[in-house]
Amino acid sequence: MNTTAIHPAQAADRLDTYTVIDVRTPGEYAAGHLPGAHNIPLDHLHTALPALKAAAARGELLMVCASGNRSTTACAELAAADIPATTLTGGTTAWTTQGHPVHRDTTAKTAWPMERQVRLAAGSLVVAGLALGIRYRPARWLSAAIGGGLIFSAATNTCGMASLLAKLPHNQPRTTDLNATLDTLSR
C-alpha cells in the first residue's frame, strides 16, 4: 500500500471529508492543530491501530505533524497494518504558513514545541561537554557526539533526540485523553 500526500490547499478544500490524526506530542498539539484533529502521538500509534482501522472504514485518514516527517512515518506504519492514510505535505508548518486556521488549546499548559526542546537539549549538552572538558579533556567528546548527531539528523531528516524527548512525561498524553480519543475514533 503506497503512502499518499496532499498539499495544504488541497487538504483545506476537503478537510471535512477527513478524519485528521495529529501524531505530534500533546504539547505541540495543544499549541496549534488543524480544526477537528485528534491527537495520537506517533509512539502510541500501535495502540491506536484498531480504532484507526475503524475510522478508516468510515472515511479517509489524514495524518499530520509539524513538518510531514512523523506523519509520513505514521502512514508507513498504518500501511503495514493495511490501513490507508494520507499525509499532509509540510505539516502544520506549511498549513499555517499558507494562512489556514489552527485551533489552540488555551486551557492546557503546553510543553515547548519539539524543535525548541531539541535545541535546548543539544545546546545544553554541547556547553556541558565544553565546560567539563576544561577539567576532564575526554568530556569534549560529548560536544563532538552531539555535533555529529545534529549533522546526521540533518542529512537523514530524522531526529533521534526528538524521539527520546518525546518519551518524557510532559510530552506524553494523559491516559484519559488518549482513551477518549480512541473511543471517539472507534465509534
Image (cartoon, helix red, strand yellow):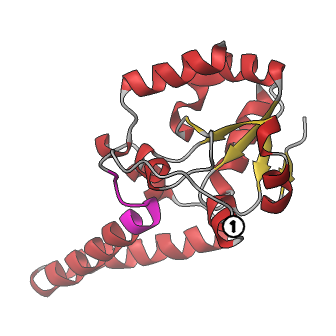
Q: Is mark 1 on a helix, strand or loop?
A: helix
As shown in the figure, which amino acid type bears the numbered disc 1?
A: Ala
- Left or right, 48 with reference to 107: right
Residue 78 percent location from the top left of the image:
74, 32
Residue underneath mark 1: 94
- Left or right, 86 with reference to 144: right
- What residue is shown at x 84% (from left), y 31% (from top)? 84
Viewer-closest of 92 and 161: 92
Does the magenta run of residues contain 178?
no
Which quadrant is home to the C terminus?
Answer: top right
User: From the viewer's perspective, is residue 174 above or below residue 2?
Assistant: above
Q: Judge the density around disc 1: few (<14), some (14-19), many (≥20) Cα neighbours within 10 Å.
A: some
Image quadrant assignment for residue 136: bottom left
Residue 61 percent location from the top left of the image:
77, 35
Image quadrant assignment for residue 47: top right
Which quadrant is home to the N terminus?
Answer: top right
- What residue is shown at x 37% (from left), y 63% (from top)? 117
- What residue is shown at x 64% (from left), y 62% (from top)? 67
User: From the viewer's perspective, is residue 4 above or below residue 179?
Assistant: below
Give, as a single range, the part of the protein colored magenta. 110-118
Residue closest to the far left? 135
Residue closest to the far bottom? 134
Viewer-closest of 61 and 155: 61
Does the magenta run of residues contain 117?
yes
Residue 120 percent location from the top left of the image:
32, 70
- What residue is shown at x 68% (from left), y 41% (from top)? 74
User: From the viewer's perspective, is residue 43 above or below residue 24?
Assistant: above
- Left or right, 123 with reference to 98: left
Looking at the rendered structure, the number of numbered marks drawn on it comes to: 1
User: From the viewer's perspective, is residue 92 above or below residue 40?
Assistant: below
Image quadrant assignment for residue 129: bottom left
